[in-house]
Image (cartoon, rainbow, N blue to C red):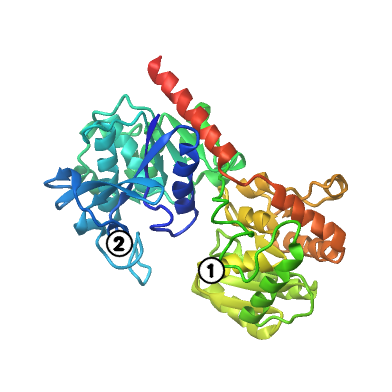
Amino acid sequence: MQVLSVTPEIFPLIKTGGLADVTGALPIALARKGVAMRTLVPGYPVVMAAFAKKKPVYQYPLLQGGKASIHAVKIGDLDLFVLDAPHLFDRQGGPYGTASGADWPDNWRRFAALSQAGGDIAGGSISGYQPDIVHAHDWQSAMTLAYMRYGKAVGVPSLITVHNLAFQGQFGAGIFGELGLPSVAMQLDGVEYYGGVGFLKAGLQAAWAITTVSPTYAQEIRSPEFGMGLDGLINMRASDLYGIVNGIDIDVWNPQTDKHLVANYSAETLAARAKNRKAVEERFGLEADGSPIVCVVSRLTWQKGMDILAAVVDGIVAAGACLAILGSGDAGLEGTLLAAAARHRGRVGVVVGYDEGLSHVMQGGCDAIIIPSRFEPCGLTQLYGLRYGCVPVVARTGGLADTVIDANEAALSAGVATGFQFAPNNGSAMLHAIQRLVEQHARPATWTSIQRQGMKADVSWDKSAEKYVELYRLLLSKRAA
């Protein structure tokens, strides 16, 4: 089975969040199940620098304002198509904006080009390659399915995975004339969205199937609270909606072999985590008094619930826990958390920014990781925590609810608890969860049981990849019918 994946990010080449981890790991997991996935990605500078031989398999005299070409390359275990369009992607900064954080004003054009290339490949533009299925990810590649619907690939089965419904790619109606789509597409059942053009909406409309990255999130987005204005369309497509929880790359995230760690360990050698804990204490200026260290590795944003956390830092410290925070985002939240660190020296430490290696050490040395997201399609951070014996403390929403078993009395008695859930998502409920954590941390046998149970959880891609294979087969059977 040949599957074309279209994505704006892929690990290890280009990453801003969990999307890249998924699109980088899924092809490898699928290969073990007899599915060949090739991934179309933009030719950002870091991607173009990753391969030497530049021999295009397809060329555009003109694609959204300039010359472009597609290269077929293999980088590590990944089979890629790279869209080399220097006028769109050869820029310094992030994949979506400048180094200062401002979005590129022509993002609609950049990702329309990516999607158009995806639609062309689906339609057989590259000699010797014809995908059986096309799998798009988020708004940046969602228009692939519209180009397929109104082009040569109308009969090729497709699906879109929604990693975060909050990001939809909404643009003014004035861009439609430059998209290269027929006029009939600018209708309610096409790409039109509240009088403009909706990239994600277009993909949801055109896809043969829609997936989210957890079963609970698939249900949540059918409600006005989580549907972000698209719940009506999603409910119309409810029979084609599936929730498949993400996995993680258990080779990259393996406490027994992780080179970022000061000391490696397993579920049987948890005492070795002490060396990683010492590194965390030193990096964040925390007292080495044996108090449970609760860490945060997150974007500091409203969606991630960081304002809720910031409001109860004093209470967390009073409960007997220390905080180690790594992240960046909202300037006001950064300032509030830095002020809390100054107020509670030795109990709260903050590093503003992102450091991949440090995030591994924190998972390997902290006692717990808190994830108070207001909504969380899946979340990978809690999966890393489970894998590393860094007990997750999570809001009961989306994939967090699906992947963490709350340490209530019944779960503790049965020996199946893997973390702590709290609801509603407010400061009082969060503090109660922290207090429960502190109580159980004071009981070494119980705490070790929670850690080991989490480390036993299957957080790999194996089961999830099998569910994607089943869905691909279902779509192919619909095509045959």
Residue denoted by label 1: 357
Q: CA distance from mark 2 to mark 1?
A: 29 Å
Disc ID at residue 122: none
The residue that disc 2 covers is 104
Q: Nearer the viewer, residue 282 or 271?
A: 271
Label 1 crowding class (10 Å Cα cut-off): few <14, some 14-19, many 20+? few
Q: For the residue carrying disc 2, how many other residues have a C-alpha within 10 Å: few (<14), some (14-19), or many (20+)?
A: some
In the image, taking residue 254 as reference, residue 109 lies left or right, namely: left
**x%, y% of residue 98?**
32, 67
Residue 83 visible to an observer of this rendering? yes
Classify mark 1: helix, strand or loop: helix
Question: Which mark sits nearer the N-terminus, 2 or 1?
Answer: 2
Find out whether the residues at labels 2 and 1 contact each other: C-beta distance under 8 Å. no
Where is residue 320 drawn, in percent x and y? 80, 73
Q: Is residue 452 left or right of residue 253?
A: right
Q: Residue 171 in the image: state x and y as whole percent.
A: 32, 50
The image quadrant that residue 103 belongs to is bottom left
Of the 4 image quadrants, the one containing the C terminus is top left
Q: What is the secondary structure assignment of the residue under circle 2? A: loop
In the image, 228 versus 283, the foreground residue is: 283
